[in-house]
Image (tube, helix red, strand yellow):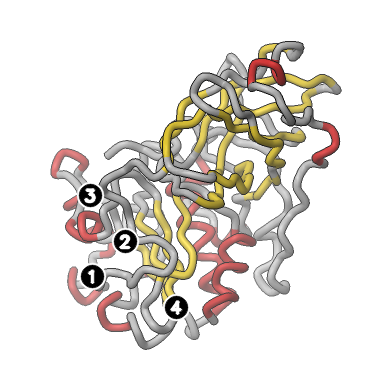
Amino acid sequence: MVSCCALLAAACGSSGDGDDTGAATPAQPAAAPKAVFPPTTGKTLVDITSNLSEGPVLAPSVSVLNKGTNRIGFALFDTAGKQLAGADVALYIGSTDGSSARGPFTARSESLKVAPQFESKQTATDPDSARAVYVADVPFKKNGKYALLAIARLDGRMVATSPIGVKVGLDKVTPPDVGDKAPVIHTETPADVAGNLAKIDTRLPPAENLLKDDFADVVGKKPIVITFATPQLCQSRVCGPVVDVVDQVAAKVGDKVSFIHQEVYVDNDVAKGVRPQLTTYKLQSEPWTFVIDKAGVVSTRFEGAFSSGELERAVTKVS
């Protein structure tokens, strides 16, 4: 399985989400000020970046984009592979030749930090585990191929990443989207594995609160959050923090919503391929998380990393 965010794996600063499991739903962090970034009217991407220094590497954490507004999570890395935190950042898009530039779409920083009791061993002991993600909401007017780049203000100067190519609405096989009925699948519980949780959860320790419900038994009866992730085998180093976030939000929200963790690989062995549940959901990357309403309809979906604040705000819509 190809990781959706193979570079999004280094530590960076926290916006404070996850510090208090008893607090109210966190507000969305403020985005960078739009005024500090160059405008695009009548310009190409080359025009916008021609006077800027060469900047960091742009590493999106999403692979599936559609016509309309898309949540794009991403990281920035310096040439040594160190993740850059705390910068004002904006994304720009244009045609593949750089023409028809649009932006800036300013980004906010979403923390992956959780309270200590919800942090897995994998997250706690991995110095390269993701700690935060930049997020920008980017509108695409039509399907097709685009160039995407970021401009950041680092140490008081503006720098630009090299553009990368992205595809919008061109994938023939895509996961369930917002508004789609969630496919009904069976997810194993401790009873299915004679209490051997290691068979259905690679997290250390297992997140028992996320294993108690079979998806097929609760869908259509209560809202559901289901996350497809493998903390021990994840190529992106993001699955561990994601499951930690889900575990924390589950503890805060309680039983009015069913929270489920589904492992990725058959017998937790990469060589054996993905489990049938991922095939049903047409997932070709990990992690993915779906927030599903009481009627069994997808309300929100996240590819890659997200904060506890983002998940709480999504759960509020269905609970």
Mark closest to the chain's N terminus, 1 or 2: 1
Local secondary structure at mark 4: loop
Name the quadrant containing residue 91.
top right
Q: Residue at x 44, y 39 (%)?
A: 237
Q: Amino acid at mark 1?
A: Ile
| Disc number placed over residue 262 in the picture, else none | 2
Q: Where residue 302 appears, x then y in whole percent?
A: 47, 55
| Disc number placed over residue 286 in the picture, else none | none
Q: Residue at x 48, y 44 (%)?
A: 142
Cα–Cα gap, marks 4 and 2:
18 Å
Mark closest to the chain's N terminus, 4 or 1: 1
Q: Where residue 231 appears, x then y in whole percent?
A: 39, 49
Cα–Cα gap, marks 4 and 3:
27 Å
| Disc number placed over residue 265 in the picture, else none | 3
Name the quadrant containing residue 200.
bottom left
| Disc number placed over residue 293 in the picture, else none | 4
